Structure formats: C-alpha cells, structure tokens
Image (cartoon, rainbow, N blue to C red):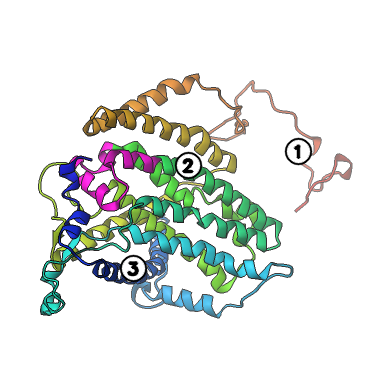
C-alpha cells in the first residue's frame, strides 16, 4: 500500500489526534460489550429466522404460536433447554465432557473483536459536552473491539480453535458414534482451513495490510474485493460454511449415518451451547466476509463515486453500524437458504472437494494475485479471476478421473435411468425374482415385513 493510502487510514487519524491509549481501550471495551450482547441476541433470533425461512421455502407456516408472529419462540426454546434434564452417560470423562461445549463456544466469542463495526468517531460530536469535560475535544476513537497489529489473522487463528471442542466432545462421550462424529469434524475443519487461509492471503496481498481498517481502505480505493476476486469470495464463503459445520458440510452430525454426531450424548444447555456456537460462528463469519469482500461499512462497491465518510459523528457511526449489520444479515440468510436447498455431500466427496478442488484452485489464485500485485495490476484482478477459470477448465480434462462410484442401475419406469429393450439385467438372487407372498426359506434369509 502506498504512503498516500496509508495516510488516510483511520488508525493513523486517531494516532495523529493524540488520543490516549486508555481512551481507545475504553471505547474498544464498550464495543465488545455491546456487540457481544447484540450477537448473542442475534443467535437466538437467527434460529427463529432459519425456522421461518425453511418454512417459507417448504411452503409451511413455521413457528407462530409463542408471542406475536412467533417472536417469543427463542425465549421459549431457551427456557426449554434450561429446564431439561442434564444427562451424562455412564463412563464419560466428566471434566472434559462438561468443558467441551465451552471449548467450541469461546473461540466463536473471541473472533468478532477484530471486526470494525464502524469507522472513526470524533468524540467532540458527543452530546452534553462529554469530550470537553475530560479535555478530549480532539480525541478520535476507532469503533472496533481490538485494533491489533495482527488484524484478521487473529480471527482465523481463534476460529481454528473450535475444532478442539468438537474433538473433545466426541472423545469424552464414551460413544463410538460420537467419536466418529468428532473425527469427521476434525478432518473436515482442518482440511477447509487450508483454502480459507489461502483465500485470506489473497485479500492481504490485494490490500497490502493485515489490519481490518487497512483492508477497508484498500476496498475504498480499488473497489470491493468481491468484484476483483469473485472466485476467492466463493471459496471463502464455502470454507466458512464448512468451518461452522453448516449444510452441505454437516457430515459431523449427519443423523442418517451417525445418529447425531459428536453431540449425540449431550442434553440440556450443554447441547444448546454447541448450536449456539454454530450460529455465533455463522454471524461472526458473515461479518468477516462483509469486511473482506463487501467493503465493511462502505456503500459504494466501485472505486469511484461518493461513499460514506470514514470519520464523523455519532449519527454517521450509527449509519455505518447499520450497513455492516445489514450485510451480515444478508450473508447469514443466504447461508440458511443454502442449507435448505442443497443436500449434504458424502464424506469422500466432501474431502475430495477440499483437497482436489478448492486447495489447488486457491493456490492458483494466490499465484496469479501475487504476480498481479508485483506488476501493479491490482485493478485488473477481475480479469485474472476469469483467467483462473479458463485454466481450470483447460486442465480439468487432462486430470486423472476416479472410478464412478455412483453408477446408475437401469430400473423399469425410472425417468433418470430407464431399463430399455435389449438391456442386460444385472445378476439378482432368486428371492428377488419370486412373487410369493411368503418367501421360501430355502431361498435364503429375507425380511417379510
């Protein structure tokens, strides 16, 4: 990033105004407390939103009995979880069994502190002369929980710690089904962290900074990264769904195969904390996506034209806060629509998508981005993204193919794979050819239900 761009960063503006570190720390603590309660409340009503969206997509009514339009349903659900029996099977490791939900919840509650929810607040615009009372007429603070130098890498690091809660929950349950679910989740989360990290590296290369405000300023200068790097945006969003175990990546809790996954043996609030962490991850991930690819509190996706100022009074900060929350809401709702539209993968398909598809593609995009940045062609990265797609389609036919494990068997009357005249029937046991009401025991074991 050039010196002229860096000079406009809100962090430099705040430092130039000689704002005491303690004032910025107090502002960050206030942001953390406020946003923690906002996101926790959002988790409760995100569950209601998902139930309403799924009902709408499936032409059902959805929850509408508790309160007007069902708005008190999250409170009823919370009371139900609190009042349910706390059950622990025989032979569990009680200490780890109890701490596992906290191990998955705490990382989700730490990551959001590096997300800028608004720009730089001029304290002199506060009402009742608060700034003048403390001698802070020239003080300016950034509305972010922690404006740390490692920036967005902190969020990626804390999100990766959630795998410990999943793995320990499956191990401590003393159940083979929970243990298999924990192993699946661990393999999945570790695998999809690789393309997620590479996608984040592309954003850092484009922005020339790891700080959140540096990434926002780069998008104000060059346009939103979702326009410059659409492939990376798709990769990052898919990885975000996989990291939070959302459909179609919810193999860790696939009820049809593993009864209930790593949380099979959990009940009451312990069970609720696993799902609270899922929605917390989803909201934080959506806000992170808005920061990296949707310009944060920016309203103009293009590198030219009018946009919201970075620095201003309390009213401007509220508008910026509303913009970030609106983008977060849209990304959360889109993730819910994906869940109720796309069926889940098989586990081999899920792992093959990561290792044979997303990781090579993300490495290719990193290479193209690095060359573009070195040559000073960041503004033309949208052409580089198109070039990556062309390369993938050119190389794909040359890659070795795996044997088709989903070969369709011809079936009489099937629309998808009909049995035509002259087709040879596959060998079948004699009992399959019998039309007797009660099969002959001599033909082998069979169910008569």
Q: What residue lies at 81% left-to-right and 48% top-to-bottom?
A: 438
- Left or right relative to 249: residue 63: left
Q: CA distance from mark 1 to mark 2?
A: 48 Å
Mark 1 or mark 2: whose residue is earlier in sequence? 2
Q: Is residue 213 magenta?
A: yes
Q: Nearer the viewer, residue 434 or 135?
A: 135
Q: What residue lies at 52% left-to-right and 61% top-to-bottom?
A: 104
Dot 3: element: helix
Q: Quadrant of residue 238?
A: top left
Q: Position of residue 228 (x, y in %)?
A: 26, 37
Quarter of the image with the N terminus is top left
- The residue that label 3 is drawn on is 32
Query: Where 355 falls versus 37 (above or below)?
Result: above
Q: What residue lies at 61% left-to-right and 27% top-to-bottom?
A: 403
- Name the mark on residue 224: none
User: Is residue 60 something that shows in the picture?
Assistant: no
- Name the mark on residue 194: 2
Dot 1: element: helix
Mark 3 or mark 1: whose residue is earlier in sequence? 3
Disc 3, disc 2: CB below 8 Å? no
Mark 3 or mark 2: whose residue is earlier in sequence? 3
- The residue that label 1 is drawn on is 432
Q: CA distance from mark 3 to mark 1?
A: 65 Å
């Amino acid at each position: 990033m050039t010196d002229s761009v860096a000079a406009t960063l809100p962090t430099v503006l705040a430092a130039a105004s000689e704002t005491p570190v303690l004032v910025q720390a107090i502002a960050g603590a206030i942001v953390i407390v406020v946003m923690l309660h906002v996101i926790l409340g959002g988790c409760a009503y995100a569950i209601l939103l998902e139930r309403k969206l799924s009902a709408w997509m499936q032409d059902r009514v959805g929850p509408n009995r508790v309160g007007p339009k069902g708005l008190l349903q999250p409170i009823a659900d919370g009371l139900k979880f609190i009042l349910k029996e706390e059950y622990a099977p025989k032979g569990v490791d009680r200490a780890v069994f109890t701490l596992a939900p906290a191990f998955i919840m705490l990382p989700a509650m730490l990551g959001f502190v590096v997300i800028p929810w608004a720009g730089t607040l001029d304290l002199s615009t506060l009402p009742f002369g608060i700034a003048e009372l403390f001698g802070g007429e020239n003080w300016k603070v950034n509305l972010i929980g922690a404006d740390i130098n490692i920036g967005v890498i902190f969020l990626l690091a804390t999100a990766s710690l959630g795998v410990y809660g999943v793995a320990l929950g499956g191990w401590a349950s003393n159940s083979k089904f929970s243990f298999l679910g924990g192993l699946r989740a661990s393999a999945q989360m570790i695998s999809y962290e690789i393309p997620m990290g590479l996608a984040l590296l592309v954003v850092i290369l484009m922005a020339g900074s790891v700080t959140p405000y540096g990434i926002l300023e780069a998008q104000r200068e060059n346009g939103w990264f979702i326009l410059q790097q659409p492939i990376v945006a798709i990769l990052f969003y898919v990885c975000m769904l996989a990291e939070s175990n959302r459909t179609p990546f919810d193999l860790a809790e696939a009820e049809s195969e593993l009864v209930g996954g790593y949380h099979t043996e959990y009940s009451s609030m312990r069970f609720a904390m696993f799902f609270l962490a899922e929605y917390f991850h989803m909201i934080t991930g959506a806000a992170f996506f808005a920061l990296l690819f949707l310009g944060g509190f920016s309203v103009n996706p293009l590198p030219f034209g009018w946009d919201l100022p970075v620095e201003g009074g309390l009213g401007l900060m509220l508008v910026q806060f509303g913009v970030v929350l609106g983008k977060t809401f849209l990304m959360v709702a889109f993730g819910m629509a994906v869940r109720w539209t796309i069926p889940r993968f098989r586990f081999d398909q899920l792992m093959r998508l990561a290792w044979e598809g997303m990781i090579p593609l993300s490495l290719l995009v990193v290479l193209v981005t690095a060359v573009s940045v070195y040559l000073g062609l960041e503004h033309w990265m949208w052409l580089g993204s198109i070039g990556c797609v062309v390369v993938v389609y050119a190389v794909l036919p040359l890659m070795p193919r795996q044997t088709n494990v989903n070969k369709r068997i011809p079936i009489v009357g099937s629309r998808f794979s009909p049995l035509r005249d002259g087709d040879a029937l596959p060998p079948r046991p004699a009992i399959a050819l019998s039309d007797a009401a009660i099969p002959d025991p001599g033909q082998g074991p069979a169910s008569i239900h």
